[in-house]
Image (spheres, grey):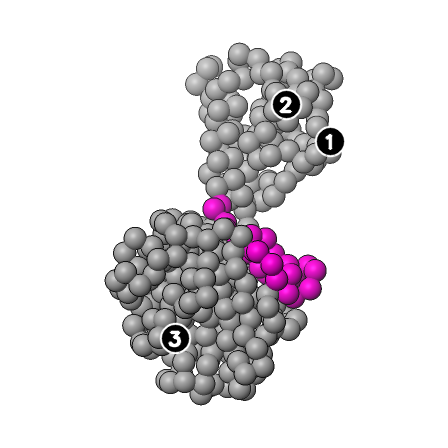
Amino acid sequence: MIWTATQLEVIRLSEHASVNDNLHFPKKPLPRTLECLVIALMDSGNEAEIHNPKKVNLPETMKKQTLLLGLVASVFSYSAHAAIIAYDGFDGGTVFNGGTGWSGNWSGGINAGSNLTYGGLITTGAGANIVQYWAGESNRSFTTAVTTGTLWLSWVQTVGAAPTDFTQIRMQNGGSRAFVVGQHNDANTFKIYDGDFNVGANTGISITGTHFVAMSVDLATSLVNLYINPTGLGSGAAPSSSVSATWDGPGSISGITGLRSVGPDSNNFAWDEVRVGTTWAAVSPVPEPSSSALIGLAALGLAFTRRRKA
């Protein structure tokens, strides 16, 4: 959520609040932390000036209130802390070249589809149908390969009537498969496969229907934790629901450089909201609290500080 200068001008945190004539707003939308500084400046008619987004002159009496508002903002601001590496909601441009954090376009093997949703997950207005594997597999690389740390990936997918062949997303390391999630010409359940399609773990959860798929990959140990329809979106170090399957592929995953989608003969596989990041919260974003909720919390905090002064 970004408030414009016009919206900020009408915000009041108390009956005594006012905007000094010398308060000047930048032309561009304000970053979240600066929004809270502006709100603080409006309190109690304190004189202050903002000449540009990087320089804020605050009266000494406003420091505690501003600090409090900044803390409130940091709690609710997803955008300031989300460590997204790549994202594609297949909305904007064509189905092949949207999103951010990618090097080049999807190579083919997909066409425009409908938006897929899951709970409170933030989504855009389109999706991608994955065509039959023999008609072409779709590849796309990240702008920056990931070779260290823990990588998180997620997407929403839907599958129609139970397929009997290939319905999978492959995590690529250059031209090789690092590991695979989905189904590979076997039972109709979510599985983790190694690069040679040996089953590493089976969730026992049917691949049919619409599901939110998320996973963490520890690139130091090659440990993969797979979550199907996880809960606790947008917060915490990991989903609040239990792991659906764990696979320890010792030494087999040295990096992830991109993704490849592979569809079944039945042509009834689609995916959407593809996210790659370094935290669970980054790949499971939910809408921020409304501006009214944030202002209400800030007002309560200011009232508390005034009561203490009294």
- Does 159 appear above or below 6? below
The circle on residue 190 is 3
The relative height of residue 262 versus residue 29 in the rendered view (above or below) is: below
- In the image, 241: left or right of 110? left
First of labels 2, 3 by sequence position: 2
Q: Residue at x 42, y 50 (%)?
A: 278
Residue drawn 46% across and 38% down?
75
Mark number for residue 27? 1
Residue designated by label 2: 42
Q: Position of residue 300 (x, y in %)?
A: 50, 31
Magenta-tinted stretch? 82-105
Give the number of the mark in front: 2 or 3. Answer: 3
Q: Measuring 41% from the left and 78% from the top, which residue is drawn there?
A: 183
Marks 3 and 1 sit apart, C-alpha to C-alpha, by 50 Å
Number of residues whose C-alpha sits closer than 10 Å to that of mark 3, classed few (under 14), some (14–19) or many (20 or more): many
Q: Looking at the rendered structure, which numbered label has been put on residue 168?
A: none
Kind of residue indicated by mark 3? Phe
